[in-house]
Image (tube, rainbow, N blue to C red):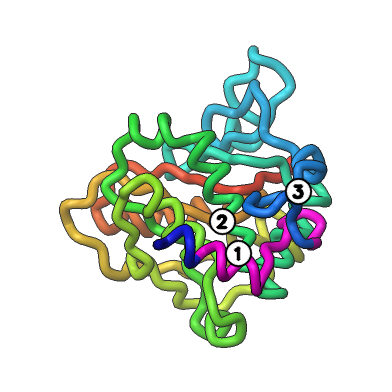
Amino acid sequence: MENIKEYIINLFFPRRCPVCGDIVQPFGELICPGCVGKLSPVGQPVCKKCGKEVESRQMEYCRDCARTPKAFEQNFALLNYNSAASRSMSAIKYKGRREYLDFYSQAACRRFAKTIRRLSPDAIVPVPIHPTRMRARGFNQAELLARRIGTQLEIPVFPKALRRAKKTLPQKQLNQQERLKNLRQAFVPGNLPPEVGTVLLVDDIYTTGSTLEACAQALKSMGVKKVYGLTLCIGHNS
């Protein structure tokens, strides 16, 4: 019955490719076969902290993680933040292309499901957005992504575990020090069961890691012992 429902929906509202934006061919796929190669999967070796590609296997950590302690244990990133990924992420957030997250959540689970199950998180927590941004946009892309991943991996999702109490400037306009200052006290504890000891924190983009760091600090102030990150895209500029 679910397959029939999905078929009818796709028949009248055909799925569009998360990379080119055209109707996906062949029918039933989540991305055009020719567009897969425009995305850049993160390849080994990677930083053991943030998950960013590093130059050689002799480097355990990228330069930023080597010089700056992090509150989170480790981040796992699916894609390098190239131009194709940037356009796709912008279309999700600013053009309402929420269906693109079907492809990205499935790809993330294929890549990291075994690792995540080994870590045994008690909960998935999406990075929150400010209420004013939520009202303007109508959704939080990190929450939608977290819910899809939670469904596939059968891990409970707690979208209200953190609250964004401070409306910050867009992070892409700031350098790393400005980002950290911008996010200071931006995230505050919300509702999370006290027995939760390990959290998988989900977001769409990791640039300098300041957002993930601020959220991890807030979660640990609530008694969470370990925080792991899962991000769709990761930048190269740290």
Name the residue that disc number 3 marks: 32
Which mark is first along the chain, 3 or 2? Answer: 3
Q: Quadrant of the N terminus?
A: bottom left
Q: CA distance from mark 2 to mark 1?
A: 6 Å
Other residues around mark 3 within 10 Å, as few (<14) / some (14–19) / many (≥20) = many
Left or right: 192 as drawn, with respect to 160: left
Mark drawn on residue 102: 2
Q: Secondary structure at mark 2?
A: helix
In the displayed structure, would residue 198 be above or below residue 140?
Answer: above
Q: CA distance from mark 2 to mark 3?
A: 14 Å
Tally the numbered discs. 3
Q: Please tell me which residue is depicted at 47% across the width and 58% down the height of the picture.
A: 3
Q: Please tell me which residue is depicted at 50% across the width and 58% down the height of the picture.
A: 145
Q: Quadrant of the C terminus?
A: top right
Q: Which residues are magenta?
A: 6-22
In the displayed structure, would residue 20 be above or below residue 189?
Answer: above
- Image coords of residue 29 (percent x, y): 65, 49
Q: Nearer the viewer, residue 172 or 95?
A: 95
Q: Please tell me which residue is depicted at 60% across the width and 86% down the height of the picture.
A: 136
Which mark is first along the chain, 1 or 3? Answer: 3
| Quadrant hosting residue 190 | bottom left
**Is residue 63 in sight in this rendering?**
no
CB contact under 8 Å: marks 2 and 1: yes
Query: Amino acid under label 1?
Result: Glu
Left or right: 21 as drawn, with respect to 93: right
Q: Is residue 17 magenta?
A: yes
